[in-house]
Each structure stands twice: as structure tokens, then as C-alpha cells.
Image (cartoon, rainbow, N blue to C red):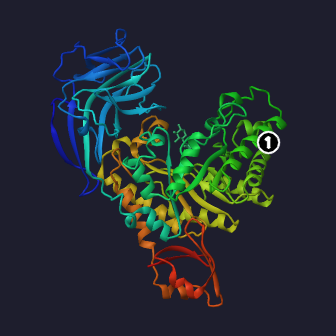
């Protein structure tokens, strides 16, 4: 970037109303290559071993960037005289943004810290690296309010062995996100509730520092998650390695925060996930597919480990976690084989699935228990059919399973509504729910920024919501990530695909957002009280009235009293009714 202090007013690509304003603070073009930029240590003057030197961009020699080596704790880059105050860095819809590049020689990132003068305005205490090696990535942060009056911005990674480049430190102001987070009546959540459905979202630690931001109502991510969704799932924080990092020593703190957040905002929680071959703790000695049983567990020993894990966690959240992915990704990708070669399958055999469901059912008889997998969305496809056949066998042998999860990590253009509908219906015939658990619909990098591609993606989202609306056994749909900046897709496709979600980096609504909202609102119906009374069979002199979360509002209410219910959505006599 060549110009300092430019003021750009650009129309956001997504909506006629969403607008984004960008103010460049420092692009290093006025420096010479080799110039040193000041560093500052928060606690002492020991900056001697670290350095911040203007250098040529490793990807584009004509561009100047800042090359930082951090060799002592708490040592940040100090950008002076930016003409800003702390107040300029915070505010409704305002983000601090910079580009970050990490050479392959870099050690692991530690905490990211940002100071305005000597006031800390951001810390990511458990920084999850989302900057792939040898690639520029845009990083976007909503800072904490500070009273500090200073034109100096200090930022960097708190580390003794970090090496990284930054460029284009800027302020981005979103004047309009394209949806109103304070308008509860015009949210995806509201319309989904009127259809009797759960619309969920996955959040993870690295997403705009969510687990720190969740109690701060001024944070856009907090507002978006709670205003648009009525269900939540942890992207990583309830997995085996997170919950039982040492054998028998359970860590509930982060997951507890998520559950408390959900309760505060009347959202349901999906628990993800109890038994999986991946993201297992080191002590289990086999955290990937095909890994051998390094600890030489006997069948009984591994069953005990599984039982203890499931019983402890499911009991801890009894009555608070609405449903669990009990077994995740157990079906093999190899078409000649049924089950994946996980440690569970190898040591226990197929009945590990049965045992897992039994342990979960015993620990919380009211929680809905799911199996979950990917590439199983469309009936007739090989893995989808092998999944179905497995589930059919589980049902036949009395495994306590309530539903089937289809992850739905999809490519734009791959959605086949008829096959998805057939899949949901064949599970209904087995007496099971069938829900979409991890929806994302990715684009190839060549289509990033293309309005046409976003529209096609939106059409795919709409198709999926419509299929779920046509199937009563599909009560929930969850989206795997809060914004395109935090999607797992780029990393898992070697950066060949991405931008798969409803919101862009700045949480502006994409066409997919409107498509999902419209799909629900088109089905949402409201009833006048007389219609509600007509919908309740006349022999039901007394009715049980629940709210949309299934919590009792009035039990054994005389039908003449239905008139006294305030406007809202209820489950009366087992039917969802919206009283206006
Ligand atoms: C992914 C997370 O989103 C990533 O942050 C993590 O690095 C890997 O796992 N199927 C699942 C999810 O069941 O748990 C995975 O989540 C995505 C695929």
C-alpha cells in the first residue's frame, strides 16, 4: 500500500446498504528498507534482543513491510505519531486490521497483545494461530475501549521465538453490517423459532477471542451470535483433548462458559463430541486415524476410559446440554470398509458405538443422542448409504440413538435437494431425527470476491434450509463458524477453498445470510388467537404450554386461558404456534 492516512469509502460487495470505511495508519512505504522501527517492552527496557526492521515483502519486492523478530517476552512494535487516540480505535463497528505473514522459520505464535499508549486494548490469552506459513493473511480485531490518549499503537506477539511480518495497519469502520443486531423480530433466530426450528452456530476460541468477548455486549461477534442464533456448539472446546487433557483430570472451565452464555441468551447447546478418532489427548497414545495402540490398552481398559469420559462429561452437563454428538466420524472413507480404523474400533470393535450411546443415555436420559459424520448428506452416494446401513443396524440392535448428524461441509454447486430430502425421510422411517450439524458451503479461491459466486452460494444455503423445513425430523441446523475469517475450510483444503459462511471478515451479511433468513421467514406463520384455538383439538380442555426451548410456560392450562398468553411462540398441544 502506497499512501498514508487515506480515507476510502467503499461499498461493501454484499449489500446495497452495508458500507465499509478504511483508514490507513501505517503501510511502511515512507520508510527505507533497513530502517529500524521502535520497540517497547511492557515491563522493562529489555528490547535489545528483539528487532523490527523495514524489509521487502517476501511475496512482492516492490512493497515495504515490517519484519519483526521477538526474542524477549512482552516486547511489542511501537508505531508512533499515527494521529489517533484510543477513542479512534474503538466504537460501534470499528476494527483494527493488519496483514500478517509468517515465514516457515517462525516458532509458534503466543499471545497477541495490542496497546494504545500504555493501556492494553487487546489480549488474546490463548492465541490460536490462524496465519498459515508463507502467506499474507488479514487479521481483524475489535479492541477494548480505553481512555488512553496516545498516538502510539503497540502491537505484537508475546513470545521469545516469534518471527513475523506485518503491513497495512489500518482502522476499518463498518457503518452498516447489512442486518440489525438489535432488531430481534427480523433475525434468522426469530423466524427459525417461528418455524419451530433451531438455528445454530459453532464458535471457537480463536474466533474474535470469543471466550473472552462473550460477556461483552459491545462486541460484534457476541451480538451476532446471540441475536441471530438460538443454538450454539463449541468448535473445539468440548472435544476429548480439551475436556480430559490428562487422564481423569477434566477441564470444564471453557465449556462451562459456553453453556452459561447459551443460558443467558436462551440458546440451546449441542455437545460436540464424545468419541472420535481425532483431537484426542496425548496420554491416550493414538490421536489419529490408523494410529496404533501405543499404550497397549486392553479392550476392557479402553472401554473404561470411554465410559469414564462420557459419564463424567454428560453428567456434568445433565439437563443443560440439549444434545450430544456421541460418536463422530466412525464411518470409513474407504468404500470397501464400514468403520474407520480408529483406536476405538481397533481395540474395542464395532460395539464401541453401542457402548458409547449406552453410557451417554445412562448419564442423561433426556439428552438427545446423535451419531455424526461427513460426506453422508446425499442418499445414493456411497458413504451416505454405508452410514445409513450402519445406523439401521444400530437401531435394529436397540442402541439408544435419537438422531443422525450430517456435517455438510459442502462445495458450492454440490447441493442436491432431492437426495438430501430422501436421506432425511429414510431416517424418519427409522424413527430418527436427521439434522445438519456443521454446514459450510465453500468457494474456490478463484471465486473469492465474486458477487455471482456469493449469490450461487446463497441459493445453495436456501435449498438446504428448505429441505430441513420440509422434514419434521430435522429440528436443527448448525453453521460451522461465525465469519469467513474464522472458517476451518482454508486450512483444511490447503488454502484452495474458503469464504463458506454467512458473514464476511467484518461480520457483514453475505447473500447467504439473507437467503437463510428469507427461507425461514417465508415459512414462519403467525396466528391470531382464534386460529390457535382452532388448532387445539376441542377435546383438549386443558393444555400444556411450553416455550420454544421446551420449557414449561403453563402446565394444565384451561383452553379459555390461552387468551391470556402474551404474544410469542409456544408449543401448545405438541404444535408450534405463534401468537400475534
Ligand atoms: C474442526 C475445527 O473447526 C478446527 O478448528 C479444528 O482445527 C479441526 O476440527 N468435523 C468435525 C469438527 O466434526 O469437529 C471439525 O472441526 C470439522 C470436521
Q: Position of residue 155 (x, y in %)?
A: 33, 26
- Vertical arrangement, residue 103 with respect to residue 447, above or below: above
- Is residue 125 found left or right of 309 in the rendered image? left
The quadrant in which the C terminus is found is bottom left
The residue at the point 58 percent across, 70 percent down is: 472
Q: Nearer the viewer, residue 538 or 293?
A: 538
- Vertical arrangement, residue 64 with respect to residue 3, above or below: above
Q: Which quadrant of the figure has residue 150?
A: top left
Q: Nearer the viewer, residue 109 or 430?
A: 109
Q: Position of residue 249 (x, y in %)?
A: 69, 34
Q: Nearer the viewer, residue 294 or 222?
A: 222
- Is residue 3 found left or right of 332 in the rendered image? left
- Is residue 413 found left or right of 454 in the rendered image? right
- Is residue 442 found left or right of 83 in the rendered image? right
Q: Name the quadrant where ligand 1 sits.
A: top right
The residue at the point 71 percent across, 56 percent down is: 391
Q: Position of residue 330 (x, y in %)?
A: 68, 45
Label 1: element kind: loop
Q: Is residue 329 visible?
A: no
Q: Is residue 539 visible?
A: yes
Q: Position of residue 148 (x, y in %)?
A: 27, 33
Which residue matches tag 1?
349
The residue at the point 67 percent across, 63 percent down is: 432
The quadrant in which the N terminus is found is top left
The residue at the point 61 percent across, 55 percent down is: 405
Amino acid at each position: 500500500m502506497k499512501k498514508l492516512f487515506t480515507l476510502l469509502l467503499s461499498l461493501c460487495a454484499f449489500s446495497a446498504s452495508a458500507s465499509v470505511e478504511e483508514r490507513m495508519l501505517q503501510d511502511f512505504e515512507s520508510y527505507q528498507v533497513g530502517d529500524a522501527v521502535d520497540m517497547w517492552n511492557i515491563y522493562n527496557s529489555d528490547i535489545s534482543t528483539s528487532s523490527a526492521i523495514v524489509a521487502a515483502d517476501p511475496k512482492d519486492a516492490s512493497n515495504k513491510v515490517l519484519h519483526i523478530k521477538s526474542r524477549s517476552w512482552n516486547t511489542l512494535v511501537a508505531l508512533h505519531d499515527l494521529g489517533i487516540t484510543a477513542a479512534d480505535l474503538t466504537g460501534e463497528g470499528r476494527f483494527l486490521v493488519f496483514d500478517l505473514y509468517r515465514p516457515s522459520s517462525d516458532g509458534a505464535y503466543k499471545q497477541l497483545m495490542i496497546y494504545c499508549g500504555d493501556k492494553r486494548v487487546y489480549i488474546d490469552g490463548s492465541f490460536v494461530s490462524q496465519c498459515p506459513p508463507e502467506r499474507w493473511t488479514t487479521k481483524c480485531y475489535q479492541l477494548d475501549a480505553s481512555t488512553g490518549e496516545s498516538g502510539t499503537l503497540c502491537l505484537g506477539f508475546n513470545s521469545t521465538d516469534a518471527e513475523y511480518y506485518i503491513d497495512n495497519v489500518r482502522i476499518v469502520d463498518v457503518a452498516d453490517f447489512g442486518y440489525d443486531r438489535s432488531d430481534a423480530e427480523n433475525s434468522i433466530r426469530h423466524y427459525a423459532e417461528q418455524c419451530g426450528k433451531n438455528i445454530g452456530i459453532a464458535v471457537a476460541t480463536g474466533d474474535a477471542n470469543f471466550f473472552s468477548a462473550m460477556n461483552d455486549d459491545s462486541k460484534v461477534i457476541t451480538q451476532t451470535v446471540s441475536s441471530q442464533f438460538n443454538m450454539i456448539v463449541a468448535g473445539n472446546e468440548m472435544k476429548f483433548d480439551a475436556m480430559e487433557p490428562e487422564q481423569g483430570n477434566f477441564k470444564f472451565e471453557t465449556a462451562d462458559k459456553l453453556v452459561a452464555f447459551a443460558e443467558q441468551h436462551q440458546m440451546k447447546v449441542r455437545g460436540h463430541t464424545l468419541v472420535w478418532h481425532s483431537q484426542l489427548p496425548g496420554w491416550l497414545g493414538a490421536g489419529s486415524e490408523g494410529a496404533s495402540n501405543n499404550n497397549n490398552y486392553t479392550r476392557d481398559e479402553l472401554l473404561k476410559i470411554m465410559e469414564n469420559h462420557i459419564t463424567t462429561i454428560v453428567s456434568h452437563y445433565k439437563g443443560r446440554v440439549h444434545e450430544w454428538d456421541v460418536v463422530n466420524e466412525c464411518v470409513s472413507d474407504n468404500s470397501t470398509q464400514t468403520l474407520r480404523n480408529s483406536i476405538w474400533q481397533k481395540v474395542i470393535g464395532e460395539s464401541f458405538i453401542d457402548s458409547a450411546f449406552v453410557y451417554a443415555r445412562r448419564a442423561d436420559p433426556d439428552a438427545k443422542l446423535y451419531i455424526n459424520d461427513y460426506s453422508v448428506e446425499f442418499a445414493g452416494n456411497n458413504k451416505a448409504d454405508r452410514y445409513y446401513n450402519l445406523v439401521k443396524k444400530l437401531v435394529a440392535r436397540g442402541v439408544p440413538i435419537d438422531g443422525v448428524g450430517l456435517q455438510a461441509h459442502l462445495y458450492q454447486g454440490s447441493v442436491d435437494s432431492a437426495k438430501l430430502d430422501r436421506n432425511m425421510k429414510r431416517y424418519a422411517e427409522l424413527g430418527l431425527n436427521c439434522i445438519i450439524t456443521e454446514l459450510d458451503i465453500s468457494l474456490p479461491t478463484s471465486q473469492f470476491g465474486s458477487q455471482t459466486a456469493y449469490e450461487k452460494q446463497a441459493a445453495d444455503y436456501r435449498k438446504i434450509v428448505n429441505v430441513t423445513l420440509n422434514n419434521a425430523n430435522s429440528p436443527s441446523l448448525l453453521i460451522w463458524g461465525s465469519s469467513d475469517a474464522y472458517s476451518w475450510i482454508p486450512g483444511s483444503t490447503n488454502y484452495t477453498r474458503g469464504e463458506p459462511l454467512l458473514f464476511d471478515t467484518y461480520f457483514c451479511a453475505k447473500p447467504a445470510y439473507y437467503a437463510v433468513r428469507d427461507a425461514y421467514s417465508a415459512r414462519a406463520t403467525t396466528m391470531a388467537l382464534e386460529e390457535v384455538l382452532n388448532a387445539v383439538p376441542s377435546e383438549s380442555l386443558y393444555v400444556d404450554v411450553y416455550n420454544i426451548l421446551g420449557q414449561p410456560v403453563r402446565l394444565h392450562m384451561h383452553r379459555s386461558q390461552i387468551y391470556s398468553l402474551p404474544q410469542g411462540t409456544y408449543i401448545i398441544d405438541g404444535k408450534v404456534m405463534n401468537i400475534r
